[in-house]
Image (cartoon, helix red, strand yellow):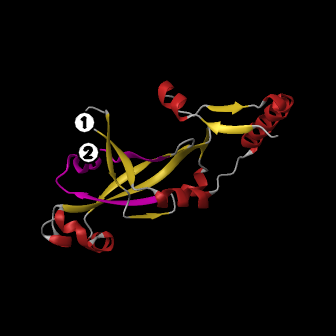
Amino acid sequence: MAPRIFWDEKIYHKTNLFSPIILFRLEKNCIEKFPEILNNIQQIKDEMKGQGNMDFKKLEKFLNRQKVSFICSIDSENFPNVKAMLKPRKHIGVKEFYFSTNTSSMRVKQYQENPNACIYFYHKGLIKYEGLMLVGKMEVISDQKIKSEIWRPGDKIFYKKGVTDPDYCVLKFSAIKGRYYCDLKTENLDSALFC
């Protein structure tokens, strides 16, 4: 009989760990399999170390599944300010991202004074945490063509005068570097991707 692997939800919540505890329940007649299990775990770790090239299609799929993003600006005292936002209205690969916001917002003022920015996306599953951090520049755009392109019918709730509302603008984020985390491994994204 092969060893059974199970997820102990009670232990996970009691210990409040960020990474899961996976326990092996070994039947009495499977104790001899334990060295084989340890060897398999080591092989998986070795394979993970050997992976070097980021799969950008995988990153795009990850981004497309997200419903929320986090944007970071720098305030007048040079402290970072983070804000949760809905996912970008549009993105071009992992290089350009377009968000809608109010022209009168504090964030817009901060980006006008200091365009240095960071955006972050994450997904937390039962046993897997995945995150993508991108660093770059945020530009405040009031160009009507771009505003119309990312406008959604429900936006009138936020911008009473519609797509031409002067309090409606677009934040365009252009990434210059990034880091991706998944399966206990962090990778710097290839800078050529952002050229």
Q: In the rendered view, does 155 fall on the left or right side of 16?
A: left
Amino acid bearing label 2: Gln
Residue drawn where x is 16% and y is 53% of the image: 104
Magenta includes 98? yes
Q: Residue furthest left?
A: 161
Tag 2 near tag 1, CB within 8 Å:
yes
In-front residue for pair 10/182: 10
- Tag 1, which secondary structure? loop
**Residue 42 visible (yes or no):** yes
The answer to which quarter of the image holds residue 172 is bottom left
Q: Disc 2 and disc 1: Cα gap in Å?
A: 7 Å
Compared across the picture, whether 72 is left or right of 92 comes to left
The residue range painted magenta reads: 95-123
In this rendering, the answer to whether 11 lies above or below 141 is: above
Check disc 2 and report the residue beneath it.
110
Quadrant of the rendering where the N terminus is positioned: top right
Q: In this view of the protein, which residue sits in the foreground, 92 or 123?
A: 123
Q: Looking at the rendering, which quadrant does residue 44 occupy? A: top right
At 24% from the left and 51% from the top, the residue drawn is 108
Query: In the shown orientation, is residue 76 left or right of residue 15?
Result: left
Give me the disc on residue 76: 1
The residue at the far top in this view is 15
Q: Residues within 10 Å of mark 1 (few under 14, many from 20)?
A: few
User: Percent x, y for residue 110?
Assistant: 26, 45
Q: Quadrant of the C terminus?
A: bottom right
The location of residue 128, given as percent across then percent down, is: 57, 43
Q: Residue at x 25, y 47 (%)?
A: 107
Alpha-carbon neighbours of circle 2 within 10 Å: few (<14), some, or many (≥20)?
some
- Amino acid carrying label 1: it is Ser
Among the two numbered marks 2 and 1 on one chain, the one whose residue lies closer to the N terminus: 1
